[in-house]
Amino acid sequence: MIMATILVFIMHIGFAALEAGLTRQKNTINILYKNSIIPSIGILTYAFIGYNIMHAEDLKGLLRIGVYFPDGNDGFDTIDDQYTNYTHFIFQAMFAATSATIVSGGVAERIKLRPFLLFSTFYIGLCFPIVARWKWGGGFMDNWEVPFYDFAGSTLLHSAGGWAALIGAIVVGPRLGKFTNGKIKAFPGHNIPLATLGVFLLWFGWFGFNGGSLGSAEPGQLSRIFVTTGVAAAAASVGAHFTSYYQFKTFDVTMVLNGILAGLVAITAGADVMNIWQAGLIGFVAGVMVIFGVIFMDKIKVDDPVGVVPVHLLSGIWGTLAVGLIGEKAGLGQLLSQGLGILIVGGFCVGFSLIFFLAIKKVFGLRVPESVEKEGLDIHEHSMHAYPYFGRKE
Amino acid sequence: MIMATILVFIMHIGFAALEAGLTRQKNTINILYKNSIIPSIGILTYAFIGYNIMHAEDLKGLLRIGVYFPDGNDGFDTIDDQYTNYTHFIFQAMFAATSATIVSGGVAERIKLRPFLLFSTFYIGLCFPIVARWKWGGGFMDNWEVPFYDFAGSTLLHSAGGWAALIGAIVVGPRLGKFTNGKIKAFPGHNIPLATLGVFLLWFGWFGFNGGSLGSAEPGQLSRIFVTTGVAAAAASVGAHFTSYYQFKTFDVTMVLNGILAGLVAITAGADVMNIWQAGLIGFVAGVMVIFGVIFMDKIKVDDPVGVVPVHLLSGIWGTLAVGLIGEKAGLGQLLSQGLGILIVGGFCVGFSLIFFLAIKKVFGLRVPESVEKEGLDIHEHSMHAYPYFGRKE
Amino acid sequence: MIMATILVFIMHIGFAALEAGLTRQKNTINILYKNSIIPSIGILTYAFIGYNIMHAEDLKGLLRIGVYFPDGNDGFDTIDDQYTNYTHFIFQAMFAATSATIVSGGVAERIKLRPFLLFSTFYIGLCFPIVARWKWGGGFMDNWEVPFYDFAGSTLLHSAGGWAALIGAIVVGPRLGKFTNGKIKAFPGHNIPLATLGVFLLWFGWFGFNGGSLGSAEPGQLSRIFVTTGVAAAAASVGAHFTSYYQFKTFDVTMVLNGILAGLVAITAGADVMNIWQAGLIGFVAGVMVIFGVIFMDKIKVDDPVGVVPVHLLSGIWGTLAVGLIGEKAGLGQLLSQGLGILIVGGFCVGFSLIFFLAIKKVFGLRVPESVEKEGLDIHEHSMHAYPYFGRKE
């Protein structure tokens, strides 16, 4: 469990590298800044209010400021003889922080720093713990006749973050020059090795993410989760490889990388209830779908610089539904529960994001001025360049 | 064991970073593409046929498609009360995938993408499991009077991959301009920090690779393996430091990096039967030898862009022989077994690689056209650049 | 414990990436070279003499060459039924090697390679084990009425290295052009994504560093250490975020990165005796202080390229004193012990560094010639460039 916490931590490195690598050079510092501060906001916000919102047993607990363990136990007490409250807290805090990182990619390269950090604080502190409480805190979705099933967060984390990213991308609008005169301009990522490193670190961290969500070290289930996680990602990358070649007639490495992530997101809901072939199927479909998702986003003219919506929202939904379609839990009742859960969580996150993004836009403004966007956020918001000497005689 | 699996996974990041960093900028995407898809091919191929080839108990099992655990057990059953079948499968699948990654470096910068992926599929699916079966699947080399000894694959993985890389490099031929009019042109790697990061991630992953090969968490042996692995790499880097300065009169960091890897490859055969000083000696010799190996490759005019042959083949042979020369297993009988094992595995891999590389060359062609090689594989096979903005006004 | 060793190993990757990223492009290879060879020197030196100096029970043991386990036990024997001697050795060797890496940043971009490696060898082999022996080897500081407390090395490792870096920076002098005509010139780091990656890898490794220092897997304490380590770093980055904006009116990502490291250094002394809020306070103060530390260094005209002194020395002192001020150990007696320990260790390290840096300067020279410094150490000492193709038509 503690190892899993460390591995989830590494996902923050992965997200930072991926998002920075897939965007333009002139905004690199801005992205690194956001991704450096979000884990910190996540840990602190979760300590102040998030943990209590997710786990409090009554209203008094809910309104308490500062992490409070159930029944007044302290952090050293263990839960079900498995792990201590402290471990439970730090694992979930790391986990919660990733939710805002997902949103970050959808609004990259044109959102102002401070308004985004403000949104992130609300999102990590309120939206994620409320949604997570409904299922993982023993809330109503866990008490349906056929409970909603989401092993490690295809819906509660990924599609939730995907909805927020989608709303954010719409509210803040596309980057300058992205959609002009009916033409779509591609802005290639500035450092593809960095993005590739990021995806591999995410895959690496995902083993901990899914493994740690088991909440025990029961070797049979744990090893199964590793197999399903690995096989789904592998099948997804192969699916993306063929689909993207078929669509674009070239071997676009960013599509394979998105495929890997889509496979990981999709298997997350049912990593513990699939066998090796079912995991492969879920991953493969996710890898195919992500390509069409990327194409679709361009068609509806929503500018999502790093593909958050296809990867986290679309694959998150697919993976959640897949639990009702195949594997040990499959069945019509489960499928309906899954669909209902997706709708409820989606509706809440859309509403939450819309209210908070619009309110922040009204009060502080969301978007940098045109001149800043053109010259780059790095030099205007951060007074520095990511690579000041490249291509320059020192 | 599960931790070890994750650490072996990180070796794929390491190989990707190392190979990309040590080659030219215009082929970076191509290398990242190969290294992103190979782990996936590895996991899937091993699931379909590799695992069965390595472990099947009869012909029927051998021809079965789809991973099949011994005696019809399922993935949750444990082997010798140590780890589950699932764990065994995913660890070995990660392991198998590294074999093709080794080959990749030897043919980099001029091989076509799809023919290479085809070769990799055959290599991971057939060559590696057949060779591994002979020893780790309880095959004939494990049943000699003095069994062949290869703790974690100096021969079965590294020198095997090194042979395939050597054959590949010869069949595909040197890069344009490498050897002209009796002169040797050095093509410096395009991103040395990336390559350095790669080697350190490999060293990091190697602890899991060697540790996991123990197949148990017996603390005494496990800690010894960590000591021998660490000390061998350290001694090798010092050996390479002095030797390369002596040879080239400059401190070439890529030579130190190759030294570290050579030390790791060499200790892999006997990590569990050496003491701290023996490990240091094996590593030091490997670090010295790798420099002469690099020089020798230029002399015989075989173009091996990232030094696969000196690092994996030469050091793999040295480390395997060293088990017969020093340490707990040393003895004439062991030395003969080691030598015989090296010859058999080498002969098989050379034959296999020759047949498959030549067949693929005949059917599909192996090498990109001259114009593509000159302008770079990235723009021709992948329609993108690794760093589209560097040195350019945005 | 073994996992912790691997995580400490990853700190070497982190230090290499951080130091390379924060310095100028023309010296990148030099920094990578130093950071590649230092872990090796560390492991070997510690095997030859360091371990014995730290743990020997009499003079004979002290003078023995080659690691020698207490009572003539071998490496497989366990200490207090917790971990084997081998594990103890390799964890501490990894740990010791980081001490020289800390020094490296303070003298970067103008020190000669070989004199620096010589200093590192002495520092790892003599200075660190002597100081560590005083407390962790059961020495006099551990036997005071109120023993000096330093859980994982805020003083014994970080402030010790910080003192050596300070002395080194003074002896070798500032980089050319840093302080001219009363003006201070900033030399921006050449690759900020690399530096960011480095800090996150350090944070990641720090969990192992602090976790492993517990020397057992007692879940309660171990999970507390993870919480305090995570929360301190998070609070520190927020502290640095606000303070640096207040001071510089811009969002400087390198200041947030320094803040994270300062928080980690500060919590290291008392990670096991603080609660979650105390850890947050210690981190926050460290994050604020580090900004003023950076400003102060410029004021006293000491050129410390990557901020070693504010991060390791200043925060190390603060974290060590904090154990006497807050948390389970707080009290006047403890505070006095902490202060006395800081003075003794500081005095010894200052003296040691002064003697060795001056002696090496006298005998071999410390600083590269002016022309080498201007054109870059990479091309002069290493005959290569870190990124030979960037901004160049291939």
Image (spheres, coloured by chain):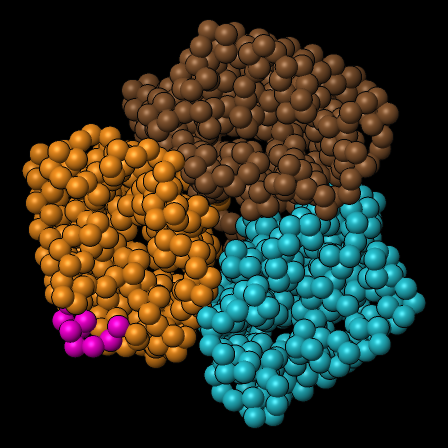
Chain colours: A orange, B cyan, C brown
- Whole-percent x, y for residue A25 in the image: 37, 46
Q: Residue at x 40, y 19 (%)?
A: C327
The residue that appears at 40% across and 69% down in the rendered structure is: A228
Query: Which range of residues does the magenta coloring cover?
Result: A329-337
C11 relative position to A61: left or right: right
Position of B119 relative to C245 (above/below): below
Q: What residue appears at the point 47 percent right and 24 percent down from the top-left corner?
A: C270
Asked if residue C367 is positioned above or below residue A239 in the image, the reply reads: above
- Residue A335: in magenta span: yes
* In the depicted structure, whether residue A14 falls above or below residue B31: above
Q: Which residue of the protein is positioned furthest toward the right in this rendering? A: B332
| Residue B160 visible in this rendered orientation of the protein | yes
The picture places residue A17, in percent across and down from the top left corner, at 41, 49
Q: Is residue B164 visible?
A: no
Total marks shown come to 0
Q: Residue furthest bottom?
A: B60
**Which is more toward the observer, A46 or B97?**
A46
Residue in front for this viewpoint, A300 or C317: C317
- Main SS, magenta residues: helix
Q: Is B319 placed above or below C135 here? A: below
**Residue B8 percent location from the top left of the image:** 56, 60
Left or right, C388 with reference to B250? left
